[in-house]
Amino acid sequence: MQSETVPQDVLFEGPSHTGVTTPLTGEGGCPIREVLDRIGDQWSLLVLAALEPGTLRFNVLLRRIGDVSKQMLSRTLRRLEEDGFVERTVYPEVPPRVEYSLTDLGRSFLMPMRALIRWADTNQPQVEAARAAYRARA
Amino acid sequence: MQSETVPQDVLFEGPSHTGVTTPLTGEGGCPIREVLDRIGDQWSLLVLAALEPGTLRFNVLLRRIGDVSKQMLSRTLRRLEEDGFVERTVYPEVPPRVEYSLTDLGRSFLMPMRALIRWADTNQPQVEAARAAYRARA
DNA sequence: TTTCATGGTCCACTTTGTAGACCATCGAGC
DNA sequence: GCTCGATGGTCTACAAAGTGGACCATGAAA
């Protein structure tokens, strides 16, 4: 009765061509895990957002985000580079200059990301309300 | 010159009605921070996805996700409940029964979330390619 | 000559997450 | 009546991840 009203378990489907619905247990190409492995951390989304307007250098990025440690920014950038979201360009000057910018893949990711942010923006009042209600109950 | 080619810094805009573009520095209602505060952890998305098909009990959820600890599942659920994504219903039986299900707000969140997952699903090959290229370079 | 800026890395310390024991309660099986 | 199992958690070591700050090599500016 419940599951009839729900179209399909699209959320857990493996690679679309297989048509196999996999559970969320680690292995098996569950697409949610894929997403999380890439952006399910504190900083990746923020870095991608920061790079949206254009190329930035390491320290600018660092200051722009504000509360990220050098180490984490470094790691996050390296992972984003590895996954093809971000391009890293080193200019062999002194002092060294390293620039980070979004690749096409990275930019294409901004689309669904914006949907998420728009959702947060519009539904923030409801979340606040829910929180207030929760506190009131407790 | 750079910032002229970019339409606007939509990603960082504060609450839409203000029209003020805030940086990503913590305070100030940056919507990305809002998103991250809610789902920018290892488990929230997974729990929401798991609840999509319908109501589930705690232990079922635990087994369904597989590699989450009781404590984290507990915390995650409480936070999702606090934020109004999830509803918690206790049946005072013995042994106790507690059921979790998505609220309307929670369900509405699945929409942008699906966009994200669809992106991951379609672009996974490109990510793989990027990784291979990266490894090859190194 | 000292000073500053760069993009990191490294270290000690703190925070976060995990695995597993534990809890109270009742029904079922022996 | 006695043990056993199942429930939804919490508590407590311990392990993993993240932080802040020191540190590095280099050369240009003061």
Image (tube, coloured by chain):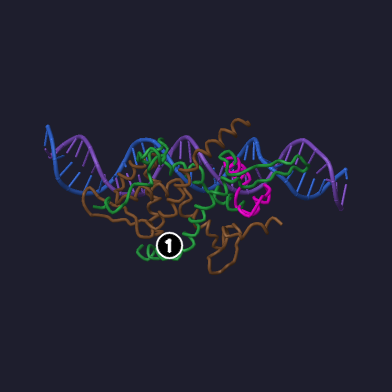
Chain colours: A green, B brown, C blue, D purple
Report the label total.
1
Residue A118's place in the image compared with B73, above or below, is below
Q: Label 1 marks which chain's residue?
A: A
Q: Amino acid at mark 1?
A: Val
Residue nearer the viewer, D9 or B18: B18
- Taking the spot 63% from the left edge, 32% from the top edge, the residue there is B137
- Quadrant where the image shows the N terminus of chain B: bottom right
- Taking the spot 40% from the left edge, 55% from the top edge, the residue there is B80
In-image side of B35 versus B71 (left or right): right
Q: Main secondary structure of the magenta part?
A: helix
Is the residue marked by circle 1 packed among few (<14), some (14-19), or many (20+) residues within 10 Å?
Answer: some
First to last magenta residue range? A52-80
Q: What x and y, as percent, mark residue C4?
A: 78, 50
Residue at the extreme bottom? B17
Q: What x and y, as percent, mark residue A92?
A: 75, 39
Q: Quadrant of residue A84?
A: top right
Q: Is residue A68 magenta?
A: yes
- Which type of secondary structure does the marked residue at label 1 adopt? helix
Residue nearer the viewer, D5 or B43: B43
In-image side of A82 versus C25 (left or right): right
Q: What x and y, as percent, mark residue A127?
A: 43, 62
Q: Quadrant of residue D1?
A: top left
Residue A86's place in the image compared with A136, above or below, is above
Q: What x and y, as percent, mark residue C29?
A: 13, 35
- Quadrant where the image shows the C terminus of chain B: top right
Q: Is residue A133 magenta?
A: no
- Taking the spot 49% from the left edge, 60% from the top edge, the residue there is A118
Q: Quadrant of residue A103?
A: top right
User: Which residue lies under the disc numbered 1?
Assistant: A127
